[in-house]
Image (cartoon, grey):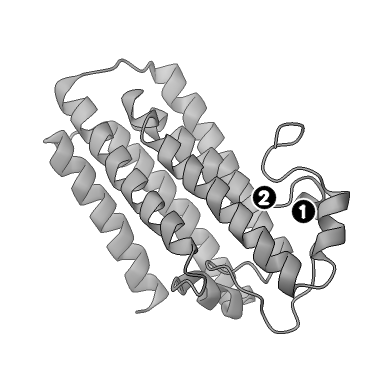
Amino acid sequence: MSALTKFFLGIGLIGLFLFLCAGDFLYWNAWLYLASFAVCIFSFGIYLYTKDNELLQKRLYAKEKEKEQDIYTYAAGISFFSTFGVCGLDYRYDWSQVSLAAVYIALIIMLFGYALFMMTLVQNSYASRIVEIQDKQKVIDTGVYSVVRHPMYTAALTIFFASPIVLGSLYALIPMVLFLTGIIFRIQNEEKVLCKGLEGYSSYMQRVKYRLIPLVW
């Protein structure tokens, strides 16, 4: 399946699910979210297509080689499905009140997360969607990787924890806890794989102490 097909299919399915749960195509938070998501992903996809098509192909491939990572895949899928569902239902039944200011602040935070995600990919051409050791792979320890060992997951958490607020729901933050749990499990398994198969990764872990958040973990 081509990158463009996956892009439109992904946007369409998320939008359809949000609007069905909300019961209203005038759900403006959803339009704001989808537009922001589409612009970020599409523009960076064009960048990768023209500058690093090999990395783009890696990002499209999502079949995990490590069986332990199936736990993360299921946790992420359930978390996203539940989060978008709760957001739509929250809009329909008016469960929580999120101010306009909070929505736009969350949008800025979400866009920062996308910027960090893009920066991480630019600095690390080995960043595929699956846990694996690639041919001739080297440890990247500069840029954002000199601050935390897994900046892509930091970016993902930033994006997805801001998303419910952009979508106008406080209750949708609850299922995001499952995503955090899955990320923690994924990192622990990934580091075992990297320590075992990637030369220099163990010493990198000694130099860069924090995995996700500086001074926290």
Outermost residue toward the bottom in this view: 135
| Sooner in the amino-acid sequence: mark 2 or mark 1 | 1
In this rendering, is residue 198 above or below 215? below
Residue type, mark 1 in image: Tyr
Q: Residue at x 76, y 83 (%)?
A: 136
Q: Classify mark 2: helix, strand or loop.
A: helix
Q: Residue at x 42, y 49 (%)?
A: 37
The crowding category of the residue bearing disc 1, from other C-alpha atoms within 10 Å (few below 14, some 14 to 19, many at least 20), is some
Would you identify the image quadrant in which residue 31 lies? top left
Residue type, mark 2 in image: Pro
Residue 131 percent across, percent down from the top left: 57, 68
Q: Are marks 2 and 1 in contact (CB under 8 Å)?
A: yes
Outermost residue toward the left in this view: 23
Quick check: 139 left or right of 94?
right
Q: Quadrant of the N terminus?
A: bottom left
Residue toward you, 25 or 98: 98
Q: Classify mark 1: helix, strand or loop.
A: helix
Would you say residue 206 is visible in this rendering? yes
Q: Which residue is mark 2?
A: 151
Q: Which residue is mark 1?
A: 145
Quick check: 36 left or right of 201?
left
